[in-house]
Image: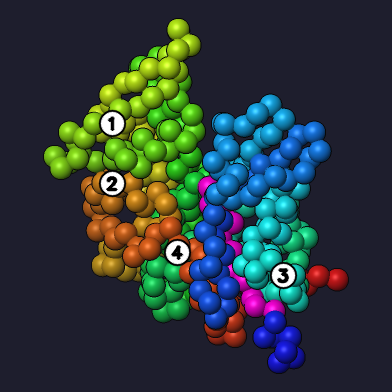
Amino acid sequence: MGVFNRLSRDIGIDLGTANTLVYVSGRGVVLEEPSVVAIDQITQQPLAVGTEAKRMLGRTPGNVVAVRPLRDGVIADFERAEIMLKYFMRQVHGGKNLFAPRVVVGIPSGVTGVERRAIEDAARGAGAREVYLIDEPVAAAFGAGLPVEEPTGNMIVDIGGGTTEVAVLSMQGTVLSESVRIAGDELSDSITQYMKKVHNMIVGERTAEEIKIRIGSAYPNDHYDDELMEVRGLHQLSGLPRTVSIKTPEIRESMAEPLTGIIEAIKRTLERTPPELAADIVDRGIMLAGGGALLKGLDTLISHETGIVVHVAPDPLRCVVLGTGRVLENFKELGRVFGGQSSMSH
């Protein structure tokens, strides 16, 4: 068993709509790549995975498509998801196919049984020996350093690319949670729509994301409300390239609707929280994790809307993967979080 253990390094995976992160036991986070696969449509062969494939988004010749196999935090394209996982799992082992590892995957709390099985099957198809699924909010809470083992209420809001997970946790378990399919992608889409409607300009997925990261904000602030950004795209009427200048307040305005959706989910969860745990949350505050936590002013907006102090996790993008890692490293003590489910491969 000793040799087997040494060779089969257990793996924790945050299989995200936008990015996939991989944790290897004993080594930490070893991979962080976009969840994108580029396929040659004629031969159906994968040409690139991850960062290299993302560069091709919207820039490929006719016979090459760059696809994101996950939508809203779940597998939308099974074959490509498996190809991607296989590639990432081999990459973390230096391209060698070692003994099948034990794999822990973070999944949105709202997934259906069918969606859970798809994730398990993809991980097994990619070479896992045992697959354990952990709800993302629980993993994110571990990764953010919340005292999830204690009998106190903790609230975590994990805003990823495809889903926002709002959960109240206590004693290593989820007391209540809500998963809404409004997150980073929705915010970027609302910018794309805004540019089309207001500036008659067509911008791609990557440009919208760049606008959101550079000048996007959720709450007015004198520090950054004067920021300008030059955006290039295609003019809708002439079809020719053009450049416009946009300011932070108009981008905030464009994202108002999805942001309201996220706030509503947080409020609904707070309303359903048992009074004792609600009192703990008021004391301790709400923890923000996921890439969405990096949107300027989002913590202020949530705090303003709920009246509760909001903290941003130390490393929001890595919370889920660090949480899967913590469970791997302390499997005996923390194994309860799986509720006894394991799918051994037969």
**Tag of residue 96:** 3
Q: Nearer the viewer, mark 4 or mark 3?
A: 3
Pointers 2 and 1 in contact (C-beta within 8 Å): no
Residue sitting at x 54%, y 41%: 55
- According to the picture, the residue beneath numbered tag 1 turns out to be 229
- According to the picture, the residue beneath numbered tag 4 turns out to be 319
Give the alpha-carbon distance from disc 2 to disc 3, as whole Å. 41 Å
Residue type at tag 4? Cys
- Quadrant where the C terminus lies? bottom right
Element type where label 2 sits in the image: loop
Q: Earlier in the sequence, mark 2 or mark 1?
A: 1
How packed is label 1: few (under 14 Cα within 10 Å), some, or many (20 or more)?
some
Q: Residue furthest bottom?
A: 2
Element type where label 4 sits in the image: helix
Q: Nearer the viewer, residue 261 or 106?
A: 106
Residue type at tag 3? Lys
Relative image position of residue 114 (x, y in whole percent)? 73, 52
Residue type at tag 2? Lys
Q: Earlier in the sequence, mark 2 or mark 3?
A: 3
Residue sitting at x 63%, y 38%: 66
* Residue 175 belongs to magenta span: no
Q: Earlier in the sequence, mark 1 or mark 4?
A: 1
Residue type at tag 1? Met
> Looking at the picture, does residue 325 appear above or below residue 267?
below
| Magenta-colored span | 8-19
